[in-house]
Amino acid sequence: RYRRPPYCYRCGAPFPWTARALDEWRLLMDMAEGLKDADRERLKSSIDDIAADTPGTGRAVLALKMLLPKVGKDAYDAASKILMAVGTAAAKKELGI
């Protein structure tokens, strides 16, 4: 089964569909209630390490596990869809999705 690649294999830049999902994540985190500013920024930046396997992926997964439940049900549901769309297999496995 074909799956669109998230990043260009030559330059590493995100394809438009990935870039859009990453932007939507950041906008969603800006709208989410119940977060301190530092937690909001941590969640916004964590998506880059969830969408690509990096040395920071484990830290990003831990941040999501700790902070994502604080955003409220509607934001949580929307965030879960984005994570399913852009998360790497390893990150999704660690997140349990």
Image (cartoon, rainbow, N blue to C red):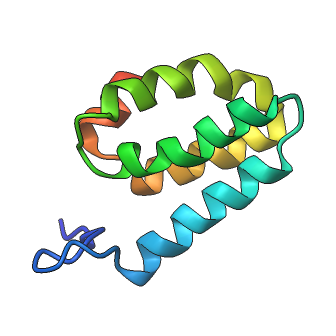
Q: Is residue 60 above or below residue 13?
A: above
Picture coordinates of residue 81, whole percent (x, y): 58, 50
Give the residue displayed 64% in from the left and 64% down from the top.
24
**Direction from residue 64 to residue 86 in the image, left or right:** left
Picture coordinates of residue 97, whole percent (x, y): 44, 31
Picture coordinates of residue 52, whole percent (x, y): 28, 51
**Direction from residue 93 to residue 25 in the image, left or right:** right
Q: Is residue 60 above or below residue 18?
A: above
Location of the N terminus by quadrant is bottom left
Labels in figure, total = 0
Nearest to the observer: residue 94 or residue 11: 11
Spot the residue most to the front: 38
Residue 60 falls in image quadrant? top left
Give the residue displayed 55% in from the left and 53% down from the top.
82
Spot the residue most to the right: 33
Residue 5 falls in image quadrant? bottom left
**Direction from residue 40 to residue 88 in the image, left or right:** left
Give the residue displayed 43% in from the left and 70% down from the top.
18
Q: Is residue 50 above or below residue 90?
A: below
Residue 97 in sight here: no
Residue 4 falls in image quadrant? bottom left
Give the residue displayed 77% in from the left and 43% down from the top.
75
Residue 31 in sight here: yes
